Image: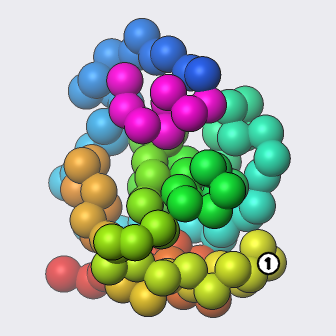
Amino acid sequence: MGQVERALGLSHGGNSAEMEGDTRRSARRNAVAVASDRLLIDRRPGAFRTLSHGALLAFRCPCGCGRLRSIRLSDPSPWRWNGDRGKPTLTQGMRLPCGWRGTLRIGVFEEYTA
């Protein structure tokens, strides 16, 4: 169980292959970032909220695998968040365990092209 799951009080008993998603897709997997105070039940790719008084940005994986992911925003961290819940932006890209690589820019999780 990861940091986000512990912070939200979530335990997961799913199939890891099913949850990690198919990384062989050729189409870009983008998702609109949507602020959600109910991240435990909100399964939309890109749904997000801050935790620990803004120290973590927790979000549903933009690839659509359904996993909860997190980015540490407190120092020391390479990421800076603009604080805008309507059109969030992170200063640096990210690589997620499911194979999704991209950035969060002006309210959209944008996957890098190959």
The reply, left or right, for residue 17 in relation to residue 74 is left
The reply, left or right, for residue 77 in relation to residue 66 is left
Secondary element at image label 1: loop
Name the image colouring. Answer: rainbow
Tell me the residue at 47%/67% (across/down). 74
At which x and y percent is residue 17? Answer: 25, 27
Residue that carries the numbered disc 1 in the rendered image: 86
The reply, left or right, for residue 94 in relation to residue 41 is left
Tell me the residue at 42%/10% (across/down). 13
Residue 46, quarter of picture? bottom right
Tell me the residue at 37%/32% (across/down). 2
Magenta includes 7? yes
At which x and y percent is residue 1? Answer: 37, 24
Type of secondary structure dominating the magenta stretch: helix
At which x and y percent is residue 81? Answer: 56, 80
Residue 14 drawn above or below residue 106 = above
Q: Residues within 10 Å of mark 1 (few under 14, many from 20)?
A: few
Question: Which residues are drawn in magenta?
Answer: 1-8
Where, quadrant-wise, is the C terminus in this rendering? bottom left
At which x and y percent is residue 59? Answer: 56, 53
Residue 67 drawn above or below residue 27 = above
Residue 76, quarter of picture? bottom left
Q: Which of 10 and 75 is in front in this view?
A: 75
Q: Which of 104 and 22 is in front in this view?
A: 104
Residue 57 drawn above or below residue 93 = above
Magenta includes 12? no
Q: Which of 62 and 28 is in front in this view?
A: 62
User: Can the viewer see residue 60 in this picture?
Assistant: yes
User: Can the viewer see residue 61 in this picture?
Assistant: no
Residue 100 drawn above or below residue 114 = above
Q: Which amino acid does label 1 sit on?
A: Gly
Tell me the residue at 49%/39% (across/down). 4
